[in-house]
Image (spheres, grey):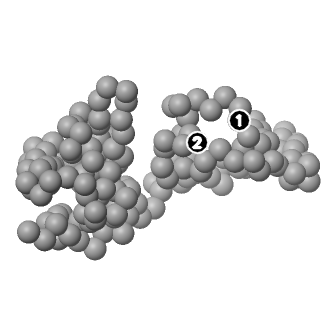
């Protein structure tokens, strides 16, 4: 069996595989969040291992440490779950289409209502659930960058100018 191409009919030529969702684990269970449906599905350890491999390899199976018969069974289970739960159907993002983006000029013309400065990436809390944590892929990690005084001053000056413009 050609493991590399077993899911070819589902994911052939896929470049934006991450759009489908994310496999994740808690202390006791493994899951898959499907971004197209918003469903969170509990899965077996084997399914979780397969999904992690697929996401890391853009829809292809590479160096999966499971017995060949287990791989075949898990792939079949995945195909059945995709069909039954209607998952892995998230469309490619072509443009943003929401009120905030479509009315961006109007919102800017109304003036800024608040200013939030992310002065540092050096959070010392390191909460396990934080999107910047080591366990969350596709987000920036905690870092050591700090906002320069000049950038902070420019942001505050821009904010003040916008606030003044909105009152005129």
- From the image, tell me which residue sits under label 2: 132
**Image height of 60 relative to 105, above or below:** below
Name the residue: 71% across, 35% down. Answer: 123
Question: What residue sits 37% from the left and 30% below the top?
Answer: 26
Quadrant (top left/top right/bottom left/bottom right) for the N terminus = bottom left
Whether residues under marks 1 and 2 lie with C-beta atoms below 8 angstroms apart, the answer is yes
Mark positioned earlier in the residue sequence (1 or 2): 1
Q: What kind of element bears circle 2?
A: loop
Asked if one can make out residue 62 in the rendered structure from this viewpoint, the answer is yes
The answer to whether residue 90 shows anywhere in this view is no
Residue, x 28% and y 65% (percent of image)?
A: 62
Q: How many marks?
A: 2
Q: How packed is label 2: few (under 14 Cα within 10 Å), some, or many (20 or more)?
A: some
Query: Where residue 68 is drawn, which disc sits there?
Result: none
Which of the 4 quarters of the picture holds residue 115? top right
Taking depth in this image into account, of 150 and 24 the one nearest to the observer is: 24
Relative side of 130 to 112, left or right: left
Crowding at label 1, few (<14), some or many (≥20) Cα neighbours within 10 Å? few
Q: Is 143 left or right of 31, judged from the image as shown?
A: right
* Residue behind mark 1: 123
């Amino acid at each position: 069996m050609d493991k590399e191409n077993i899911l070819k009919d589902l994911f052939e030529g896929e470049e934006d595989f991450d759009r489908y969702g994310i496999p994740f684990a808690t202390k006791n269970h493994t899951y898959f969040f499907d971004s197209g449906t918003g469903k969170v599905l509990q899965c077996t350890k084997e399914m979780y291992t397969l999904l992690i491999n697929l996401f890391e390899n853009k829809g292809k199976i590479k160096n999966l440490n499971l017995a060949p018969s287990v791989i075949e069974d898990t792939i079949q289970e995945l195909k059945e779950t995709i069909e039954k739960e209607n998952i892995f159907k998230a469309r490619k993002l072509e443009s943003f289409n929401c009120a905030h983006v479509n009315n961006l000029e109007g919102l800017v013309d109304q003036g800024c209502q608040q200013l939030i400065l992310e002065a540092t990436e050096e959070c010392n809390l390191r909460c396990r659930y934080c999107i910047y944590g080591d366990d969350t892929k596709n987000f920036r990690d905690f870092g050591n960058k700090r906002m320069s005084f000049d950038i902070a001053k420019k942001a505050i000056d821009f904010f003040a100018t916008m606030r003044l413009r909105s009152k005129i």
